[in-house]
Every structure is written in structure tokens, then in C-alpha cells.
Image (cartoon, helix red, strand yellow):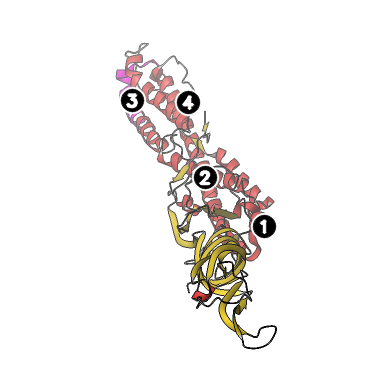
Amino acid sequence: MRRRICFTSVFILSVVCTHAQSNPALFRCKDQKHTINLSINNSGQMVEGPVCAQIVVNAVRYGADFGKTVSYTGGANLPSIFPSSFSAGGAQPPRVESLNDHFMADFKNIQSLQGQLFALEGMNRKTGSDTDKYLATLRALIGQTDETLKAGGPKAVVALVTGPDTQRQMDDAIRNAFNWTTADGIVAGLQRVQADLNALPALFPANTGTVTGDPCSDTNIGQLGWTDWSKCRDAQYKAAQSMVSAALTEAGAWTSDSDKAAQFAKKIGIVQYWKNTISTLSEGSFTLQSEVLCGVLFNKNEQTILKLLLVDRTSVFDGQLGQPQTKDGLLTVTCSSPFAVTAGAAFSTIRNRQFAIVKSVPPSGGNSINTFGVTSDSRINPYPIAMAHARLREWADNRYALHFSFGVGANVKGDSSGGSSPEFLTGPSISFWRTIFVTGGLDVGKQSKLSGGFKIGDTVPPDITSPPVSSSYTAGFGFAITFTKP
């Protein structure tokens, strides 16, 4: 009986990177507005986060991920693909009346088993050769996908590897594998014949009849026991033993636990691996994404460097584990602190008046008199300011942003205006390219006025040499234009 091979196990290629991804559902960024398209040859590019890094790779040839651990299922690894026991092969030698007939039956059985072995070897060699030819074709096909991807994109690659001709050749190669058979049954038959030959002296120890004349004649040979028969057929008996021994040695190379069986099973496992890999492909499989989000970092900057891990699946053809290749520095994503400090000019709408004693003509004419007056009355007052900004939201790739801002300025005034004092501005800001900030909001500063109950136009008493001025904080509208440090 000839035993077919059953391919039941999977040849596993495991590559440990940094994160395992066995789920066929590809990761997709939640935020698709900040997508950055990369290539394998990218290096040193820096962008401001958040981003969705995207790269197109040859998903047929490469297993790839952004720094995540990836497991790859390869061809067949067959430590236990073959059944542990097999049914007997070859014909059961019939019980015969004489030693000579028994030997001739064994000899015919040897010849039959030799014929089966020669046929098995021929078929296995042809099947193995056909499989080798297809593996070479398949390897060329996988190599072709690189150029196909460049020329036609993922759609062209999927069409190439899932086309009817490609699938038919792959299915034929797997189906053809069942023509490869093991020699376990033949070996069992040869071992039984060998044991039967060795048992002849015990089975037929003595002659079964009277022998007259030549004991080796056709008339007498059927009545001989082992002692006399072996003298007549010693050469044939030794030749039969030699044939069995040689056949056992040759058949041993094709048993289920032989190197030939293991190598062939691995080849078919490789074909099955590629069939499984191709069956899960879609156009989306070629696009990988990795999302880098920028959260609340308080007053810190964060830098994330993306790397790409690639495993070339074509190493499966050589029966080797795929070795990960790391593309370092593919993209650097910077998440800046949401806080910024700027300096510039602020403008306050708090009224600023400078008081003085002025000479004025009395209503009735005559000599001039001293009255309280104003030499300067400004409705818009500029002052230098330093501001701190907390970023709330950004748009258009960081071109514009909304901030909440607070600033402190120095409103320099003379004594006649109440003296210099700090002034405060707080409110929302709009920034441009994170460099120019325009702020508008509540301005809190000191406003001066005449004290002592005097008013503008009152006559100055003789004992007063300068206007009595007091100041107090009040609120108004202010705006500022500030800049970050170059």
C-alpha cells in the first residue's frame, strides 16, 4: 500500500520586533486631516504633531509595521505531518507446501516491491522537480511585485497575484503534492520478506520425502529441507537477501521520517504560505498608518521618532527565518509645549492725562491767574509688554492658533500723570506661524485724576506749587502685537 503525505501543520516564521500585529484589520488613524505621506527612503524629516504617518509598502513581499511587533506565518514546518503508523504494504506471502515454493514466493514478492519502489521514486522525483520549477516561478512573481507597485500601485499588484492564472498555478502545485508518496508500506513489506527468509531454516528443518539421484533436480527440490536445499540454492538465497537489504536502504530515503519527505513538505508549505498571504490581501493592505497625538504636555516639548520595521518574506523560499530590517529616523514628530512667551507693544484705551498748573485769563479780563489744567490727554496709550500664551487650538498645519494670554507691561508716566506703574492685559490671542501674536482683551492699568476735590479749571491756591494727583487701577480694552524670540 502506498501512503500519501497529508500536510496538516504550518511552517511558522516568527519575527519579534516591538509589538505583535496578527489582526488582519489594519490600523487607521482617527484623525485623517494631518496625514503625512512617507517613503521607505525617508530620513530626517521633521514635522509638528499631531500627525498620521502613512507609507505604502509592498504588502506581498514585506511584512511591515511602525515599530510594532509582527508575527508572520510562513510555509509548512512539518515535525508531525505524517501518521505515526501505517498499514502494511506488499502482499502477504502465502503458506506453501515446500521450502522451495516458499522461497520462490518470497522472491516474487521482492521483485514486486522493487517495482513499486522504482515507480514511487520516479513519481516523487517528477513531483519534486515540478514543485521546484513552480517555486522558482513563484519567487520571480513575488520579485516582480516591486516594479508593479511602482508602475501601477496596489491595485495592479493585487490584480497580478490574485489573477486566475496565478491562482490556478498555485492550486495545481498544491494538488500535485499529493502525488508524492512515502515508502513506509514498501519498507514494511521488505522487512516481512527479510524476516521470512531468515526464518526458512526453522520453518523447513528436514526433507519431506525420499530423495534419490540428484537432490537439486526439479523432482527432488520440492522435498528438500533447509540443509540440502541450501546447498542447491545458496547463490539464489544470498542474492535474495542482498536484494532485500539494498531495497530497504533505498526505500529508507523515501519514508515519512526521511530528509527527502521533510524537504518536500517544507516546499509545499512555502506554496501554501504564499497562498494564505495572498488570500488576505486587499488594496488597503499596502498602506500603513501610525498616529502620533499631541496631548497636554504642560510646559514640555515632546519628540517622537518613527521607525519602520520590514521583514522580507522572500527569505521563506530559502527556508530561513525572516530577519527584521529597521528604517530608523523615518519621521520625527515634535509636539511643542502649549505655552509660549512673547514680547512687543500693547495699546491701552485707559485715558491718560497729564496735569499741570497753567496760567489762564480770568473771564473779566485783567491779570492772568493760575488754574489746574491738562497738558496731555491721550485716549490710546502704547507701552512695552511681555506676554505668556496657552495654546487652545490650531488650524491649517499650525499656521493659525487660538491662545489664552496674559501679559505684564510697564506704563511709564511722569509724576504729573500719577507715576509709572505695571499694566496688565489678558484675553484671547490669535497667532500666525507660532511667531506673531495678536491679543485683545481686558486691560487693567492706573488712571490719574486731580485729588483734594479740585477739578480742571479751578484756581490754584497760593500754597500749592504742583497739582495734587492720585491714581487708581481701572479696566479698559487693550490689544497687543507681540513676537516670539527669533
User: Which dot, 3 or 4, sits closer to the camera?
Assistant: 4
Quick one: 98 or 28, which is closer to the camera? 28
Q: Secondary structure at mark 4?
A: loop
**Distance (Cα) linking label 2 and label 3:** 75 Å
Quadrant position of residue 472: bottom right
- Residue under circle 3? 232
Q: How many marks?
A: 4
Residue 186 picture location, percent across and down? 46, 30
Quick one: 170 or 477, which is closer to the camera? 477
Magenta stretch secondary structure, dominant: helix
**Distance (Cα) linking label 4 and label 2:** 40 Å
Which residue is situated farthest in the top direction here? 209
- What amino acid is at disc 4? Phe
Q: Secondary structure at mark 2?
A: loop
Residue 250 visible in the shown view: yes
Residue 127 picture location, percent across and down? 54, 44
User: Within 10 Å of the Cα at label 2, are there few (<14), some (14-19), or many (20+) other Cα atoms?
Assistant: some
Which residue is situated farthest in the bottom direction here? 366
User: Which dot, 1 or 3, sits closer to the camera?
Assistant: 1
**Distance (Cα) linking label 1 and label 3:** 78 Å
Any magenta on residue 234? yes
| Position above or below: 378 against 254 | below
Mark found first going from the N terminus, 2 or 1:
2
Q: Residue at x 59, y 46 (%)?
A: 275
User: Within 10 Å of the Cα at label 4, are there few (<14), some (14-19), or many (20+) other Cα atoms?
Assistant: some
- Residue under circle 2? 21
Q: Are marks 4 and 1 in contact (CB under 8 Å)?
A: no
User: Which dot, 4 or 2, sits closer to the camera?
Assistant: 2
196 left or right of 60? left
The segment highlighted magenta reads 223-239
- Residue under circle 1? 155
